[in-house]
Each structure stands twice: as C-alpha cells, then as structure tokens.
Image (cartoon, helix red, strand yellow):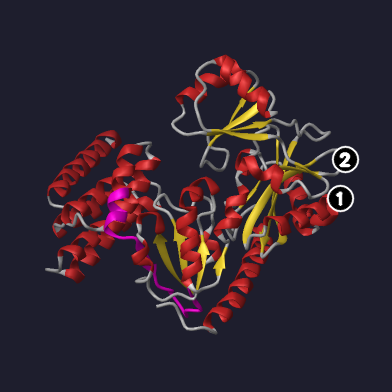
Amino acid sequence: MGEAHNDALAEALERVSRALDAAPLDAALHVRMLAAMRAINDDAGSTAHQLALAALEMVGAASIEQQALVLYNVATVYAMKGRSVAAIRWYQHALNVDPKLASAHQNLAVAFDGQGQHQEATLHRTRAYQLQRVFTETALGHERRRVLILGVGKGTGNVPLDALLPRQTTTRIRYAIDYADEAEDATLPLYDLVFNAIGDPDIASPLAARLARFVALCGRPVLNLPEAIGRTHRHKTAALLANVEDVVVPRCIRLDARPASIDELGNQIADSGVSFPLLMRPLGTHGGEKVEYHDSPATLLPVLVDLEAPAYLTTYHDFRSPDGYYRKYRIIYVDREPYPYHLAISSHWMVHYFSAGMIVEPWKLAEEHQFLDTPFEVLGKRASAAIRAIGRQLDLDYCGIDFTLTPDGRVLVFEANATMLTHREAQVGPLAHKNLYVDRIIEAFEQMLQARTITALGRSRHA
C-alpha cells in the first residue's frame, strides 16, 4: 500500500512537471505542483511554488520582464537549496520568457559550472555580461555607504563579500569590469569607495592596465589596490617575503607551456630549483581544488598534458608535527593587522577544516580555541613577529595567510593573498564559539570602511 501510494505521488508529480514545462506561468499548475511538493515533504519545492503563486497573483498581466522574474525566483529558491538541476530548468524557463534577463544568464552560468557543464556556463556568462555589467544591490536597512565592487564575469573566488560588505548597511554595486569598456566607467551609479574584489592575481593580471586606468580616474578610495594584488602570485611569494625574517616559502614555479616530453619536464623542474616531491595546482583554483601530490615526472606529465590551463609546481615540505598530525593556521589581515581565523589539524597533508575531524575530536577544537584566544602566545615570539611583518609586506586592506610552524618556530607559508574565506558559523552548534573571533575580523573591516567612507564623503561623490 505504501509503495503504491509513493508511486502514485511520483507519477502525479511527473505529470504536473511536464505540464509546467509547457506552461510555466500557469497559476493553476503551480497550485497542483505546490500540493504535490507538500505531499512528498519537499520544503524547497513547496517554498518555490508558493512564492510563484504569490508573485503571479501580484503581477497579473505584467510585462514580460516581470513574468520572467516570477520564474527566476522559483529557480533561485532551488539554487539556494543546492538543487542545481531544478534551478537550471527554471532559469531556462525564465529565459524562454525574457531572453534578455541578464541575472538569469548569470545564475545559470554558476549552476552549469557546478554541474561540470563548463561550455554551457561560458555561453551564458558571456551573454549575461553582454547584456549588463552593473548589478546594484540596495542596502536592506539604513545605508551607511555605497561600495563599488570591482569583479570579473567569473565572480570573486574566495573573497567573502557577504561577510565584509553586509547587505543590511551597504549598497553593493557589482561591476564586471572585464566585459565593460572605459566609457561605461563614467556612467556608473554613485559610489563612495571601491573594493577591488579581483583578489586572484592570475585573473587580475590580464586586466592590469585596465584596472590601473580605472583606479587613476575613479576619484574614490580603493581597497586592495590592483598593483598590490599583482604581487601575490604564488610563484612570486618567496621574493615578496624574502626580507621578512623567520619565514620559509617553498620554491614555486609557474608552468605556462605543456612540456612535450618527460625529459623536457625533468629539465624544466631541475633548472627551476623545484624538486620532487611537489604539489601541482592549476591556476585560478582555491580551497585545495585539483591540487595533487607527485613524486616523479612520470606521474606529473600526463596530468600537465591534460590540463586546460597553466599550473603551479611547488616543492612539498613535510610539515607534520611531532605528534604525527598536520596543522594549518589561518590569519586574516585587515588593514595590515593580523587576526586569527582558524586552526585545522588533520592526519592528511591536504588539510581541510571539515575533513580534518575537528568536530568529532574535542582535543582539536580545544587546541584551536587556544590559538584563537591567544594566537601570539601559541605561535611564539619568532613566528608572531614574522606574521606581523608579513601583513605589512603584503600591504593589502584585506587578505590572509595559511601557514604552519617549523620545528624551530618559524613560519612555513602555504599561501598569502587576498582570496581568503571568512564566514560566521551557525549560532548553535559545535563551532559557535568561533563567531566571537570572526566578528572581530568583520568589525575591524567595518571600522576601516567607516574611516575610508568618511574620507570619501569629504569629496564630491563620483557621478
């Protein structure tokens, strides 16, 4: 009986889904879909189609754009719940109604990327920014400032805009500058200051001249100046920090051309000073994505040949602590001052916070808590001085460093750049205590924004 009932629900759901594909703006069909979603306890689906019904009742015989937005909102509910297939379907419905809805193209590109359909993602991303380069998100509450966010069509990587520029108080004007010509710079909405969110130097480098001209002419304070971002390439980090005492930066090279043979690869590595074992990382990736460990040219060459992009090769340093665990500390710099963000402790050299068993092993959280509470006591005198000096040397308004400690108390750098994630944890749960320290980072950034905004408001606003 139960199985037959479930089969009947699935069949009914399939019938109304097909009907909605043919008539996605039919309110009666959304009523049926809402009932079907409730019957199978699909909260996301129920929310999406309840929202559609409310919107359809409001817009009535509205413009094509408003009708498309009804379907766009259905898609966005699914996207926010991680339901990429459903999101793609409804964004496509929205675009069938209004092919010029840039935000639908933009979000569809993100969804396709998430599904590994990169060619489709590129097509929709290009279409989105051909239609529109400027996207304004008005402050939800009392507006303290208007920030122009310099970005590119592919987004801002790990730069945490939602944490740093809260929607409640900040009007955010996102500008895909890589798709805009310089004439459009003069037509931008009013803004008080600029946040350069193109934090990855590999993405920023091709735009260096364009960004320099924008900064020179915008007449506003600019956070994270492009030239400072340009100094943070992974293969340039050793040179950037060469004069900072008690810092170890593993040798790293950027390999732009695919080697033709194993002998050519071996020669390139030998000439560069990089040695095996090494880590291979494609350009423009973050969070350990596609990072691989290789101990010989024989395993590395096939991977490099198959890569669509250049790669970094970095000498691997065994950084196990005496207890056999690998530790990765993260410090966030706000206006060049260091703030502790996290410590991850793992049994594997690829240290990720949520695969390290931090929550299930209380001693790890206790050690992290000690680092967050008294970071410079934990790091020791040599490393603490080095960490402070690194912040001054990076010379960025927002950035961070991932590192560990050597046995003699020096800083072994994994990476130091502006693409460092910062976010609050759930208010209830095993990581809730970390929010105190995250809030200190966000508050420091807010204070810097206030100071820079006051400076900005002392002049005439950009028009």
Measured as percent of width and height from the top left, residue 20 is found at: 16, 49
Q: Which one is in front, 212 or 451?
A: 212
Name the element at disc 2: loop
Asked whether the residues under the numbered discs 1 and 2 touch, taking CB atoms below 8 Å apart as contact, a structural biologist would say: yes
Q: Give the range drawn in magenta.
A: 126-146
Measured as percent of width and height from the top left, residue 182 is found at: 37, 63
Position of 103 with respect to 356 (left or right) is left
The residues bearing labels 1 and 2 have C-alpha atoms spaced at a distance of 9 Å
Measured as percent of width and height from the top left, residue 209 is found at: 48, 55
Specify which label sits upstream in the sequence, 1 or 2.
1
Tally of marks = 2
Q: Name the residue under label 2.
A: 408
The residue under label 1 is which amino acid type? Arg
Q: Residue at x 69, y 25 (%)?
A: 275
Please indicate, yes or no, whether residue 46 appears anywhere in the rendered image. Answer: no
Q: Residue at x 74, y 56 (%)?
A: 372
The residue under label 2 is which amino acid type? Asp
Name the element at disc 1: helix
Q: Is residue 269 above or below residue 391?
A: above
Measured as percent of width and height from the top left, residue 254 is found at: 58, 35
Q: Which one is in front, 36 or 146?
A: 146
Q: Is residue 307 above or below residue 54?
A: above
- Let me know if residue 226 is in the magenta part: no
Around disc 1, counting alpha carbons within 10 Å, would you say few (fewer than 14), some (14 to 19), or many (20 or more)? some
Around disc 2, counting alpha carbons within 10 Å, would you say few (fewer than 14), some (14 to 19), or many (20 or more)? few
Q: Residue 162 carries which label?
A: none
Q: Which residue is drawn at 76% across and 44% down?
A: 363
Q: Which residue is drawn at 79% across and 50% down?
A: 244
Please indicate, yes or no, whether residue 241 appears anywhere in the rendered image. Answer: yes
Q: Which mark is residue 382?
A: 1
